[in-house]
Image (cartoon, rainbow, N blue to C red):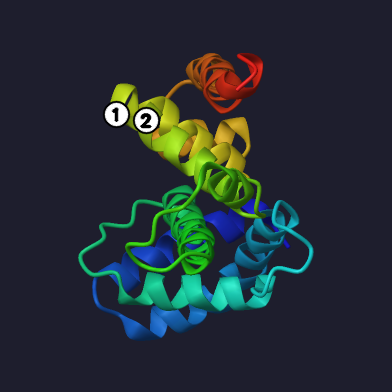
């Protein structure tokens, strides 16, 4: 398969779908399914082994949400996969948060030991990363988007630069800075002995 032709086909079909051509969505689905599945596998590899959601189910849920999106002015393949990555992240974070909340009754006080146990539950790392990314977005939206595209979306430096209309060097610099900032945020409590 020719990657350049695939990219131009995806972009052409996205634009047609955005203009209301539902047949373009069917053709688009056939082209992007494998790539979406690859993204889902990458996401699920970071989850606990006994996670109830499988990669295929994650792709299907993301697909349903993508199809329901209204008024998106699709620019190109990178933009599509950036949105898909964000949706997959939201799905997994929502599941992790729901699992944490199910562990305790509504309004019930939780002891410190229980809270620490809940924080150590599988999925807590994803929720902590999501919270840190949201804090980063409040400070620097571009760096947060770069992390989302690179880490969650699996996009290469060049694809990330294209999706955000940035230079390759800017993406590399912001990627390094954002990773260091997130590392500090996620390890702040453990480094202080908390």
Q: Are marks 2 and 1 in contact (CB under 8 Å)?
A: yes
Q: Quadrant of residue 189?
A: top right
**How many residues crowd around disc 1 within 10 Å: few (fewer than 14), some, or many (20 or more)?**
few
- Of residues 179 and 123, the one drawn nearer to the viewer in this rendering: 123
What residue is drawn where x is 68% and y is 74%?
54
What residue is drawn where x is 43% and y is 26%?
143
Q: CA distance from mark 2 to mark 1?
A: 5 Å
Does residue 81 appear left or right of residue 176 in this picture? left
Q: Quadrant of residue 172?
A: top right
Q: For residue 19, which numbered disc appears in the image? A: none
What residue is drawn where x is 76% and y is 69%?
50
Depicted 78 relative to depicted 67: above or below: above
Is residue 73 in view from this perspective? yes
Question: Residue at the right extreme?
Answer: 49
The image shows residue 71 at horizontal and vertical percentages of 20, 65
User: Mark 2 = which residue?
Assistant: 135
SS at circle 2: helix
SS at circle 1: helix
Question: Residue at the left extreme?
Answer: 71
Q: Quadrant of the N terminus?
A: bottom right
User: Mark 1 = which residue?
Assistant: 138
The image shows residue 167 at horizontal and vertical percentages of 47, 20
Q: Quadrant of the C terminus?
A: top right
């Amino acid at each position: 398969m020719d990657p350049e032709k695939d990219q131009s086909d995806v972009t052409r079909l996205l634009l047609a779908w955005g203009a209301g051509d539902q047949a373009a969505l069917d053709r688009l689905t056939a082209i992007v399914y494998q790539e979406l599945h690859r993204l889902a596998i990458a996401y699920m590899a970071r989850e606990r082994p006994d996670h109830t959601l499988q990669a295929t189910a994650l792709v299907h849920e993301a697909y349903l949400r993508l199809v329901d999106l209204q008024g998106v002015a699709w620019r190109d393949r990178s933009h599509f996969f950036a949105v898909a990555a964000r949706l997959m992240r939201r799905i997994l974070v929502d599941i992790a948060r729901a699992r944490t909340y199910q562990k305790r009754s509504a309004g019930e006080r939780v002891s410190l030991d229980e809270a620490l146990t809940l924080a150590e539950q599988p999925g807590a790392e994803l929720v902590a990363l999501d919270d840190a990314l949201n804090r980063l977005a409040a400070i620097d939206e571009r760096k947060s988007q770069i992390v989302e595209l690179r880490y969650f979306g699996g996009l290469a430096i060049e694809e990330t630069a294209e999706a955000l209309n940035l230079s390759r060097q800017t993406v590399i610099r912001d990627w390094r800075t954002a990773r260091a900032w997130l590392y500090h945020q996620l390890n702040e409590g453990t480094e202080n002995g908390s």
